[in-house]
Image (cartoon, helix red, strand yellow):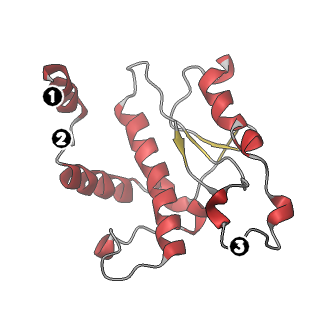
Amino acid sequence: MTVSSAAQAQGRINFDDLQSEQRYREIRVYNQSKLANILFTYELARRLADTGVTANVLEPGFVRTNMAVPFPFSLFSPMRVSAEQGAQTAIYLASSPDVEGVSGKFFSHKGVATKSSKDSYDESITQRLWQISAKLTQLSTDLQSSRREAARD
């Protein structure tokens, strides 16, 4: 299970500056990372098909955390949910028999399967990001090879 955010809808994968070494803009990087979480999870679900292992991604809602410590109150503060409320979708996905065997889905807060952004379904973006990520982490892009390597360790 992977946690993303509604911010993924604003995310764009910038392959020309994937690690934001040329220009760092906090909100753009955050949005890109949340889209990348979804792309990763969808590809992982495809690669794990027929193994009995599932991979889903969730958006917990606008959760009240310490991320906004410099700005503890904003116009949006009343819309935020508690950490306990934000955790409900993760708990649901981890424990409910209703989602047993369900894989490759995006769940919004309250455990409802929904659609993620248009870019999150673009397999050319997914494949390119998977290949680059594997290279950066020095891991195999082939799931079977990765399983063999893990078994040797």
Q: Left or right of 76: which side holds 23?
A: left
Inter-mark Cα distance, 3 to 1? 46 Å
Could you classify mark 1 by the number of other residues whose Cα lies within 10 Å: few (under 14), some (14-19), or many (20 or more)?
A: few
Which secondary structure lies at badge 3? Answer: loop
Residue drawn at point x = 66 percent, y = 66 percent:
68
Could you classify mark 3 by the number of other residues whose Cα lies within 10 Å: few (under 14), some (14-19), or many (20 or more)?
A: few
Q: Hey, what amino acid is under mark 3? A: Phe
The dot on residue 71 is 3
Marks 2 and 3, the one that precedes in the sequence: 3
**Which one is nearer the viewer's eye here, 39 or 74?**
74
Residue placed furthest toward the bottom: 23
Marks 3 and 1, the one that precedes in the sequence: 3
Q: Quadrant of the C terminus?
A: top left
The quarter of the picture where residue 102 lies is top right
Horizontal and vertical percent position of residue 90: 63, 35
Circle 3 or circle 1, nearest the eye: 3
Q: Hey, what amino acid is under mark 2? A: Ser
Horizontal and vertical percent position of residue 78: 86, 62
Which secondary structure lies at badge 2? Answer: loop
Residue drawn at point x = 37 percent, y = 59 percent:
125
Q: Left or right of 134: which side holds 22?
A: right
Dot 1 and dot 2 residues touching (CB under 8 Å): yes
Which secondary structure lies at badge 1? Answer: helix
Q: Hey, what amino acid is under mark 1? A: Glu
Horizontal and vertical percent position of residue 115: 63, 49
The dot on residue 149 is 1
**Which one is nearer the viewer's eye here, 22 or 141?**
22
Horizontal and vertical percent position of residue 55: 48, 33
Circle 2 or circle 3, nearest the eye: 3
Q: Which residue is mark 2?
A: 140
